[in-house]
Image: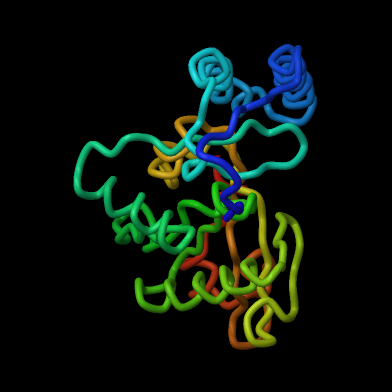
Amino acid sequence: MREKTSEHLYESEVPGARFLQLGLIFCRYLLARILLSEHDMAVLLEVALSPLTHLASSRIIPEDTMASFDEGIPARVLPEPTDASDRALLADVRAHGYHLLTVAGDKDGPTYTFTIGLVYTFNHPEILVMGKAEAAAHLFLNGLVRAIRGGRRFAGNQTYTDALDNSPVAFVPIPLRHYRDYIGYAMWLYRSMDFLAIQALYPDAGGTFPSDPAADTHVKAQQPILEQMP
């Protein structure tokens, strides 16, 4: 988390900074038009006004609710809780930097667990893992977060041979079209889809990842790859 230096921090003390931020948002919109599919672009447009609302309404931000971001990403403000679940999530983010949420499997898919707060605390994509029981998923994700806390960065479309005690982990990006259904609670924290999320993949006993057609069928069934799903 960032060091405390004053009672409050201003979004910017540079004249014209708001126009610069709006320009950056417009540039990111143009880049999204180039990189995203029509479906993902339609989903993104649903929340396109959220950064503008933030710029219009938030002038002074209490320092203990801020995180630093690179590449012109606006500082994020934690939302107000509305129930016990929200309060527990925010307490974990403030105390530990992140919260873990497990969603039980059903006929539509396996159990999965994901982080909430990595973007806020570490400016690192949120991470989701499929097919592990809650305790095993927590052990897995907590290990990745320890590495992140120590300075590691994980990105989509990359494989790291030493991500977890010399165990390989692969990461693939999670498309915007799956944010609502799979990591909607993270959207509540950031009040938008304006954050990155990646899916962590673990190999079968032979070291083959589920993205490989030769992977064990059970491991593949337990780890549907969201990027490959409609």
Between 124 and 45, the one nearer to me in the picture: 124
Q: Residue at x 58, y 24 (%)?
A: 44
Image x and y of residue 85, in percent = 24, 49
Q: Is residue 184 above or below residue 200?
A: above
Horizontal side of 109 relative to 217 (left or right) equals left
**Colour mode of the rendering:** rainbow
Residue, far front: 6
Displayed quadrant of residue 13: top right
Q: Residue at x 61, y 55 (%)?
A: 122
Total numbered circles = 0
Q: Residue furthest left?
A: 84
Asked whether residue 180 appears in the rendered view, the answer is no
Q: Nearer the viewer, residue 2 or 115?
A: 2
Q: Is residue 195 above or below residue 107?
A: above
- Seen at 58% across and 73% down, the residue is 146
Residue 105 or residue 23, whichever sits in front: 23
Q: Position of residue 135 (x, y in %)?
A: 36, 77
| Residue occupying image coordinates x 63% and y 80% | 164
Which x, y percent locates residue 152?
A: 71, 68
Is residue 172 shown to the viewer in this render?
Answer: yes
Along the line of sight, the residue nearer the viewer: 74 or 176: 74
The image shows residue 216 at horizontal and vertical percentages of 57, 78
> Dividing the picture into quarters, in which one does residue 45 lie?
top right
Q: Quadrant of the C terminus?
A: top right
> Which of the 4 image quadrants contains residue 118?
bottom right
Quadrant of the drawing holding the N terminus: bottom right
